[in-house]
Image (cartoon, rainbow, N blue to C red):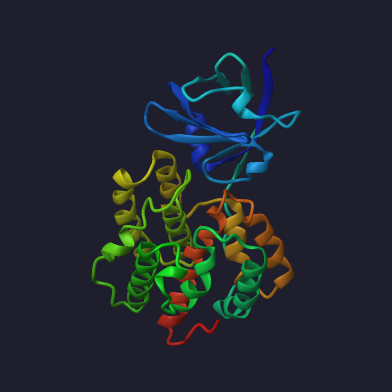
């Protein structure tokens, strides 16, 4: 018996994928979602509503709580035709009535001063309920630039890379960034376990935050280097997310967090952080570390310390 569904919300990159009529195949399968790659190397994430909106995501409406691992396998053929997705012989997904999702710009009134006011709330939230893995335990130091010992870090490479990059970014924001991105920072690409390694998620947060604040030239310089590194240092799915971030787009939960940390609404901030916590194993927090790195460097470039 075939399962029938439809795409209800589609990201910009996913929409570009779905209008193609080339051959494709499943390259990753999880309980709530699966990744499909076409012959041009483009990737889409198809999943149920719980995956949330994002640039690569085609969010589907299923009648039941589907487990994709019981429906398809890696290597399953995918056909895109007549405004529908055919996953092997078991699933047909209608793509003709989907709504397109794009992240909202920063709200009116967003200010770095609110970020400084909200930072203690953010750090307390992480200390009480945040993960002990990935980059979340480093966010206080990422914000302030305070040096910490390797034993407290995700690893000596991660902290060295983040610290060096933060200094480079502060100088760049002051118009003094003629030097290349530090080698230690480039080695963050592909660093860490998981489908999207912590180092890649960090760079996603960096690029999205810079573009959200209008620092396009610096973001372009970073994205050129990082995407080049991603060709051989990380997996194709993570690279697809990095490509989206280079154009200023990531998971809706991350965009909501970027908005919330710069507004005078700590109730909303807490609500947003709870949603961010559900983004991957530690992906939400690893991306937020990149965002906080950018905001901390911005504050420092203006001559103000970040007190945490």
Query: Residue at (62%, 19%) from the top-left corner?
Result: 91
67 vs 301, nearest the viewer: 67
Could you tell me how many numbered marks the image carries? Answer: 0
Q: Position of residue 56 (x, y in %)?
A: 52, 41
User: In which image quadrant can residue 37 be found?
Assistant: top left
Is residue 71 shown left or right of residue 221?
A: right
Residue 107 in view of the camera: no
- In the picture as drawn, the residue positioned furthest to the left comes out as 179
Image quarter where the N terminus lies is: top right
In the image, is residue 280 above or below residue 31? below
19 vs 262, nearest the viewer: 262
Is residue 304 shown left or right of residue 276?
A: left
In the image, is residue 85 above or below residue 116? above
134 vs 273, nearest the viewer: 134
Image quarter where the C terminus lies is: bottom right
Q: Position of residue 114 (x, y in %)?
A: 61, 78
User: In which image quadrant can residue 105 be found?
Assistant: bottom right
Query: Residue at (64%, 34%) from the top-left corner?
Result: 98
Is residue 197 shown left or right of residue 10?
A: left
Q: Position of residue 11 (x, y in %)?
A: 56, 42
In the image, is residue 77 above or below residue 28? above
User: In which image quadrant can residue 136 be found?
Assistant: bottom right
Residue 63 in view of the camera: yes
Is residue 73 shown left or right of residue 265?
A: left
Query: Residue at (42%, 58%) from the top-left corner?
Result: 203
Q: Position of residue 229 (x, y in %)?
A: 30, 51
- In the picture as drawn, the residue positioned furthest to the front comes out as 151
């Amino acid at each position: 018996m075939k399962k029938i569904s439809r795409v209800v919300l589609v990201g910009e990159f996913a929409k570009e994928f779905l209008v193609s009529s080339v051959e494709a195949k499943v390259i990753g399968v999880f309980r709530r979602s699966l990744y499909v790659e076409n012959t041009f190397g483009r990737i889409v994430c198809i999943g149920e509503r719980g995956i949330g909106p994002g640039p690569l995501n085609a969010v589907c409406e299923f009648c039941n709580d589907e487990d994709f691992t019981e429906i398809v396998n890696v290597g399953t053929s995918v056909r895109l035709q007549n405004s529908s997705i055919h996953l092997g012989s078991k699933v047909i997904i209608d793509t003709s009535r989907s709504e397109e999702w794009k992240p909202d710009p920063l709200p009116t009134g967003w200010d770095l001063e609110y970020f400084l006011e909200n930072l203690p709330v953010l750090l307390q939230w992480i200390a009480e309920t945040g993960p002990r893995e990935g980059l979340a335990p480093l966010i206080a130091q990422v914000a302030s630039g305070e040096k910490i010992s390797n034993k407290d870090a995700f690893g000596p490479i991660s902290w060295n890379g983040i610290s060096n990059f933060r200094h480079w970014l502060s100088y760049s924001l002051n118009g003094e960034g003629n030097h290349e991105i530090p080698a230690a920072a480039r080695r963050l690409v592909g660093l860490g376990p998981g489908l999207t390694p912590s180092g890649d998620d960090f760079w996603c947060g960096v690029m999205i935050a810079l573009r959200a604040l209008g620092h396009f030239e610096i973001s372009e310089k970073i994205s050129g280097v990082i995407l080049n590194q991603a060709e051989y240092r990380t997996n194709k799915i993570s690279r697809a997310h990095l490509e989206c971030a280079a154009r200023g787009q990531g998971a809706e939960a991350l965009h909501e967090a970027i908005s919330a940390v710069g507004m005078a609404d700590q109730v909303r901030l807490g609500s947003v952080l709870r949603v961010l916590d559900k983004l991957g194993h530690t992906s939400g927090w690893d991306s937020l570390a990149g965002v906080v790195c950018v905001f901390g460097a911005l504050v420092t470039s203006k001559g103000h310390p970040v007190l945490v």
